[in-house]
Amino acid sequence: MEMKHAGLLLMVASLVACSGTAEPPPAAPLAQQEAPAQPAPLTVAGAMEAFKAAGLPVIDADEMTAETDSNALLGRPGQYNGKVNWTDSRHAGSGPSNTVEAFANDADLQQRKAYIERVTAGSPMLLQYIVAHRNLLLRLDKALTPSEAAEYEAAIKAL
């Protein structure tokens, strides 16, 4: 009987020794795909610099703060986080009537754009040129001619 146990023990030992399951080599790491770098958000100050660099007749530029924004929206949840009002000197009689607003995300920008379009729709007195580019919303007074408005649009879209 001892011989039987010894034989059985020997057989089990050899099976264990031979059956060592080698762990598969670790998988080679997948090449990490880098997400495309997101461009830095545009600023209202950068937009104003672009207008001036393009030779546009910007005067009376006034960068709003949370305290000076007449709409009381600057910095509020879901609203713009930067705003400048200015006058085009070719149409200086009416005071600052052009605006550029900066947003934290596209959803907020699109919501604001849709709101402005709804409010001004059907009212010639409130008509504006409205241009969205990246995180900026450009609102130009209807006093500008289409070619003058196109100059601002080209300058902002070059950013």
Image (tube, rainbow, N blue to C red):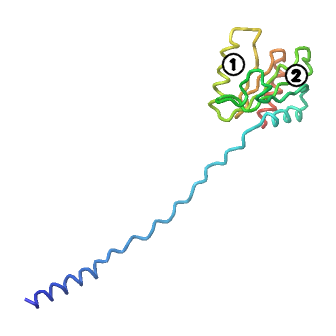
Q: How many numbered callouts?
A: 2
Question: In which quadrant of the rendered view does residue 69 lie?
Answer: top right
Position of residue 111 in the picture relative to residue 26 (left or right) = right
Can you give x and y, in whole percent of width and height, for residue 119 in the image? 68, 14
CA gap, disc 2 to disc 1? 19 Å
- Seen at 58% across and 54% down, the residue is 33
Question: In which quadrant of the rendered view does residue 91 lie?
Answer: top right
Q: Is residue 89 above or below residue 157?
A: above
Can you give x and y, in whole percent of width and height, for residue 13 in the image? 23, 84
Position of residue 21 in the picture relative to residue 25 (left or right) = left
Q: Residue furthest front?
A: 67
Q: Nearer the viewer, residue 69 or 110?
A: 69
Q: Is residue 107 above or below residue 37?
A: above
- Circle 2 is placed at which residue position? 87
- Circle 1 is placed at which residue position? 116
Q: Secondary structure at mark 2?
A: strand
> What residue type is disc 2 on?
Thr
- Seen at 79% across and 24% down, the residue is 99
Image quarter of the C terminus? top right
Disc with the residue nearer the chain's start (2 vs 1) = 2
